[in-house]
Image (cartoon, rainbow, N blue to C red):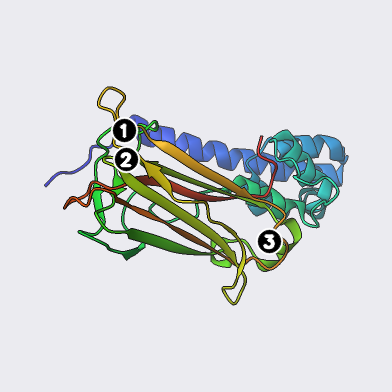
Amino acid sequence: MFRPHHSPNMGAARSANSAGNASSLSFLSSASASSEAVFPLPPDILVEIFLNLPPNQVVCVIRLVCHQWKDLADGEFFWRERCRREGYHLQDASRAPSNWRLFYFMCKRRRNLLKNPRGEGWDLSNGGDGWNIERPIVPHPNEAIQKNFATSYQMCIKSQMIELEKEGYSPSFMDEFQPSIRISDWYAPRCRCEYVISVQLLNHRKEVLQEFNPDAVYLPQFDQQIGDQWHQMTHVFKKYGPGVRYIQFIHGGKDSVFWKGWYGARVTESCVEVFPAMDT
């Protein structure tokens, strides 16, 4: 049976690292205690120190040390300054957030809200021989992408519903900030084919508030000398008003020569992101 070999040096390094972290926190706590008992550290110096600590440590550790530190770590100035230093700028300067800490973490945790954009996990409508998951015939510009969906000789559609509150975007956050919502999708031909996409912003009753529904894209058969290149479809929803609770992402395609198999449009790296801050 394989048993991992633990180097004494590795164990010592971990112990030293843990001891270092504990020592740092112990130092901060003792500094606070001594400052309250003997001389208080100037708030601007404390804030500067806190701004150079990981944000989770500020929230989970620093706030618990003493009342003074909690007030500084909870202050609007601290999180507004943190946003400024990390480049999280308001899209509309006239609409300052009521909670800068929430705004900061929503910016920090920006991510693709679609599950498994390169593989399984979608609601599928299969035409022809249905959807197929394959390796890209021609490399994608992003070398990390090693899978794509391929469509068949009748329309293949797949969709995914995003519930914003489950993803951490509360109704109050969406209504107050109305953050930009960026859509991105990559598609490519194999033979003559058709590619379609539709993205809808829905309210709590799943009624359409705004949608992106461009005309179908018709792609010619690829040129052997050029290769069947990948194309990117993008759209940004802005100033869509209050009430957005869901995002419905739908796309698909088919081939135009009706060949059995998977010769239609190929898609991959689909992405839906919420941008609380201005995209710089």
Q: 194 or 177: which is nearer to us?
A: 194
User: Horizontal and vertical percent for residue 39?
Assistant: 88, 39
- Residue at 70%, 35% (x, y): give it: 87
Question: Pointers 1 and 3 in contact (CB under 8 A)?
Answer: no
Helix, strand or loop for disc 3:
helix
The residue beneath circle 1 is 228
Q: Residue 54 or 88: which is nearer the viewer?
A: 88
The answer to whether residue 24 is left or right of residue 196 is right
Dot placed on the residue nearer the N-terminal end, 1 or 3: 3
Question: Which element type, helix, strand or loop, lies under badge 1?
Answer: loop
Q: Which residue is mark 3?
A: 174
What kind of residue is marked 1? Asp
**Residue at image location 78% in from the left, 49% down from the top:** 69
Residue drawn at (29%, 42%) of the image:
192
- What is the residue that sits farthest to the front in this orientation? 257
Distance in Å between CA atoms under marks 3 and 2: 37 Å
Give the x, y percent position of residue 160: 43, 62
Q: Is residue 137 visible?
A: yes
User: SS of the residue at dot 2?
Assistant: loop
Which residue is disc 2 drawn over?
Answer: 189
Which residue is pictured at 26% across the width and 62% down the height?
127
Q: Nearer the viewer, mark 1 or mark 3?
A: 1
Q: CA distance from mark 1 to mark 3?
A: 39 Å
Query: Measured along the vertical axis of the image, is residue 206 above or below residue 160?
Result: below
Q: Do labels 1 and 2 touch, CB within 8 Å?
A: yes
